[in-house]
Image (tube, rainbow, N blue to C red):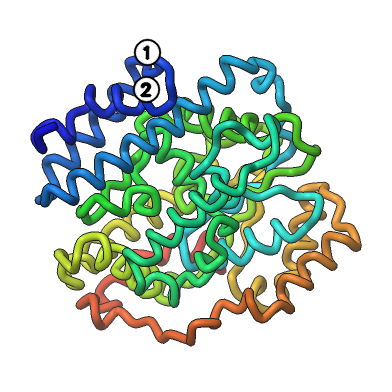
Amino acid sequence: MSTTHLLDTDSIIESAEIAVGIDSAVDAHLHQRVDALVRLFREQAAFTADQMIATRRQIVKNLARRMGIEADIARHPEILDEDIEAPIFVVGFARTGTTLLQSLLAADPANRAMPAWRIREPSPPPGDGPMSLYRLRAAEDDVFRYVARCPGNLPLHPYWDAGALALIEDDEIFTIDFANAYPTLLYDAPVLAVMFELDDPDRAYGFLRRFMQHQQWRAPRKRWVMKGTAHQKYMPALLRAFPNARCIFPHREPAEFMPSIMAIVASVYDGINSGGVTRRDMGQFLIEDFKRSAAALADDPALDDPRIVHLPFADMVQDPIASLHRFYDHAEIAFTAESEAGMREWLANPANSADRYGRRRYTFEPFGIEWAVHSRAFDPYRARFLE
């Protein structure tokens, strides 16, 4: 196959169908989303032949994952009868304590979280039989290939050292549906960022629910713990898909978390893009994006929904267990002795320390951001969520 056809939508779909062993598995809407990603890659990236081959392989793999799920549902339509009971969603900006909350909630034995192996090896689902060692190793290898590609990321987000057991963002689930393009599943594509706005949030959250049903089928009943750094932008769609959901939304002073986000974004795209974007260009793009996002949140009436609990970062840091106890009480979820014991055990384990690869001090300076110029733009966000 010539390199000109490596990033061809129909050829990619054909390869994914061959991998899964089914035909005509892509409807018009999915075809459109795949084509949008492929065209964007062709337009944005300067590929070597090897990079094009590797990128094609990852796109095919993601599409095959998506097709495999639908094939499982076609064989077992009762999967869609699964009831997703009162799931918990951790929402909010990255670097505001969302991963700590996700990890502590996952430590409650009554809850079920979403580890990396579920999205990398989703089919057949666990309810169809024991997960093979081969598939677990394949998921582990994929996680550590990402870590190797972006070595600067691990000290900033050490949770990836759990490999196939690392807890993921829901953005990865949207990525195999081609509603997003999260770099952890597309790290071979030498582009800066292709995070999409959800063009059809209801459809996207419908697939998220479908994926959770698929992974829950025939499994012991537990409460799902999910997490996404963009859910807050789509709360009406999330709550339409999961009307009995309970959401926890941590809030932190923007001057504290934004330099940290910039550092982690730079660590990812230095590996993927080989430093092809300057820190100043990246910083300018991100600060403007944060300003738009914060302004939208400050004015969004959907965030007054009683199913959403807003949690100040300072309270969470001072006593995370007490903060989650209050959240459980508000959500009318039993905070049992087992819940607390699991969370305390997780906190006490040195392997879970956020500083296990060293401490970092984050500043705007490498990104050329004069914070005083931008700070007041976040006053409405502060007034609503931090005062």
User: Disc 1 designates what residue?
Assistant: 24
Single out the residue that lies furthest toward the front. 134
- Residue 276 % position (x, y): 14, 64
Vertical relation: 20 (above or below) 45: above
> What kind of residue is marked 2?
Glu
Question: Residue at image x 54%, y 64%?
Answer: 251
Give the CA separation, mark 1 to mark 2.
Answer: 8 Å
User: Who's the residue at 91% across and 63% down the image?
Assistant: 337
Percent of width and height locating residue 345: 78, 72
Q: Residues within 10 Å of mark 1 (few under 14, many from 20)?
A: few
Q: Kindly state the secondary structure of the residue where label 2 is placed.
A: helix
Q: Residue at x 69, y 39 (%)?
A: 130
Image quarter hosting the C terminus: bottom right
Disc number at residue 17?
A: 2
> At 22% from the left edge and 56% from the top edge, which residue is drawn?
192
At which x and y percent is residue 183?
A: 35, 52
CB atoms at circles 1 and 2 under 8 Å apart?
yes
Q: Report how many numbered discs are placed on residues in the image.
A: 2
Q: Residues within 10 Å of mark 2 (few under 14, many from 20)?
A: many
For label 1, the SS is loop
- Percent position of residue 342, x then y: 80, 65
The amino acid type, in three-letter code, at marker 1 is: Ser
| Between discs 1 and 2, the one toward the N terminus | 2
Q: Is residue 314 left or right of residue 94?
A: right
- Residue placed most toward the observer, 182 or 287: 182
Q: Is residue 172 left or right of residue 47?
A: right
Q: Is residue 245 above or below residue 199?
A: below
**Residue 240 visible in the current orientation:** no
The mark lying in front, picked from 1 and 2, is 2
Q: Quadrant of residue 41?
A: top left
> Horizontal placement of 35 versus 115: left or right?
left
Image quarter where the N terminus lies is top left
